[in-house]
Image (cartoon, rainbow, N blue to C red):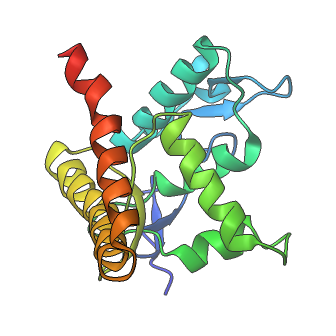
Amino acid sequence: MLLLTDDTRHTTVLPGMSITDCDRCKDLGIWITPQGRVAVCPNIEMGNRHVEPSEAAQAVKRATDRLQRNGGTVHQLSFDVARKLSYFTSEQPCDRDSLLNSHFGWTSNNRLRRFHKVIEELRSDWLLPVASRKEDPAGYWISVDLDDFSEWVQRSKSAPITQLGTIYKLARATWPAFAEQIELEFWKDLAPEHEEL
């Protein structure tokens, strides 16, 4: 459903998606130059009318600035995914299929694996707070709020803890000696952390 408005800042097409004003940066405020560097949008540089970048767009800028400052490379695919995620929120996240179809349609093999690799790159290399949720409303977005980020952290860490607990129970029930080895390794892995405190 296309909603036409007198305000040319954004013409809403679907919840969470919009037609953008800036043809260069798509309202992100930054773009990848022909030389492969992320820079401020030329329209902003020239003082042309430009939509104020959202909080999520500003988070993308900080992440790319930090990555480049530390000698990292901003890959076009990761940049495009980050830009798309900047249009979404916790209330209206971007669903996985939309990301897969718009950015990973070029490959029929391992689309999901490649998608997860890009999300992991955004989180671990860019240090961009890409949050996600499996329950409704399900999807991905860039977290710009501490409470929202905290909720995502709680959801994210509960899955591995549950999985490790299940693995330990299976080992204890099936191979008790192996379960003892898991316990020893666990405490051994924690020891260096405690020594630093």
- Residue 176 showing in the rendered view: yes
Residue found farthest to the bottom: 1
Q: Is residue 13 above or below residue 164?
A: below
Q: Nearer the viewer, residue 118 or 189?
A: 189
Q: Nearer the viewer, residue 21 or 80?
A: 80
Looking at the picture, how far across and down is residue 146, in whole percent?
A: 18, 43
Q: Which quadrant is home to the C terminus? A: top left
Q: Which residue is at a point 20% across and 57% down the rendered structure image?
A: 154
Q: Nearer the viewer, residue 98 or 46?
A: 98
Q: Quadrant of residue 7?
A: bottom left
Looking at the picture, how far across and down is residue 31, in whole percent?
A: 67, 33
Q: Nearer the viewer, residue 138 or 48?
A: 138
Q: Quadrant of residue 6?
A: bottom left
Q: Is residue 95 left or right of residue 184?
A: right
Q: Quadrant of residue 195?
A: top left
Count of numbered tags: 0
Looking at the picture, how far across and down is residue 14, in whole percent?
A: 46, 78
Q: Is residue 31 above or below residue 76?
A: above
Q: Which residue is at a point 45% across and 59% down the rendered structure image?
A: 10
Q: Which residue is at a point 41% across and 33% down the rendered structure image?
A: 58
Q: Is residue 58 left or right of residue 162?
A: right
Q: Is residue 116 above or below residue 33?
A: below
Q: Is residue 197 left or right of residue 14?
A: left
- Residue 21 showing in the rendered view: no
Q: Which residue is at a point 80% across and 27% down the rendered structure image?
A: 36
Looking at the picture, how far across and down is residue 100, in whole percent?
A: 66, 72
Residue found farthest to the left: 147
